[in-house]
Image: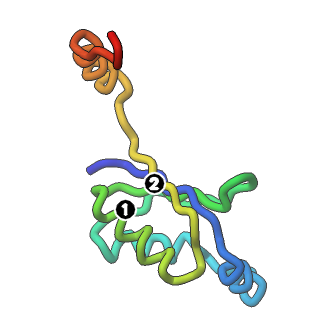
Amino acid sequence: MARFYALGNYTQQGFQGFCKDPTSDRSKAAAIAAEAVGAKLISYTGLRGSFDFLAVFEGDFSQAAGVKMATEASGALCNINICEEININDVAVQAAKIAKAYKGPGQ
């Protein structure tokens, strides 16, 4: 299983929900969403800054995209960015292969 990091924001509707119930535990909602598609929530953290939350979970990309689609469709969340954990050295090995053969425009 891959590990995914979902950074996102609450909408006006989402913040209105917090005002109605300021003790709402969004980690439980995130766990339910992940479990519904067979993924596993690792952690859920509220953030201060450009994003309002970070959810870390294990699964595959279609599961991550499904959670994004369903939760954004609810109207409570938006701007969810899904990042996949990678081994940068594996990427560099592939890039080195390409760098030997690739020619840019006009080269």
Which residue type carries mark 1?
Answer: Ala
Q: In this rendering, is residue 105 above or below 57?
A: above
On the image, the x and y values in percent for residue 97 come to 22, 16
Q: Which of 18 and 71 is in front in this view?
A: 71
Q: Quadrant of the C terminus?
A: top left
Residue found farthest to the front: 106
Q: Is residue 27 left or right of residue 68?
A: right
x 44%, y 71%: residue: 31
Q: In this rendering, is residue 98 above or below 18?
A: above
The residue that mark 1 highlights is: 64
Q: In this rendering, is residue 96 above or below 52?
A: above
On the image, the x and y values in percent for residue 7 come to 56, 56
Within 10 Å of disc 2 (Cα), the crowding (few <14, some 14-19, many 20+) is some
Circles 2 and 1: CB atoms closer than 8 Å: yes
Q: Which of 96 and 19 is in front in this view?
A: 96
On the image, the x and y values in percent for residue 60 come to 28, 56
The residue that mark 2 highlights is: 82
Locate residue 68: give its quadrant.
Answer: bottom left
Mark 2 and mark 1: span between their CA atoms?
7 Å
Q: In this view, does 8 lie to the left or right of 59?
A: right
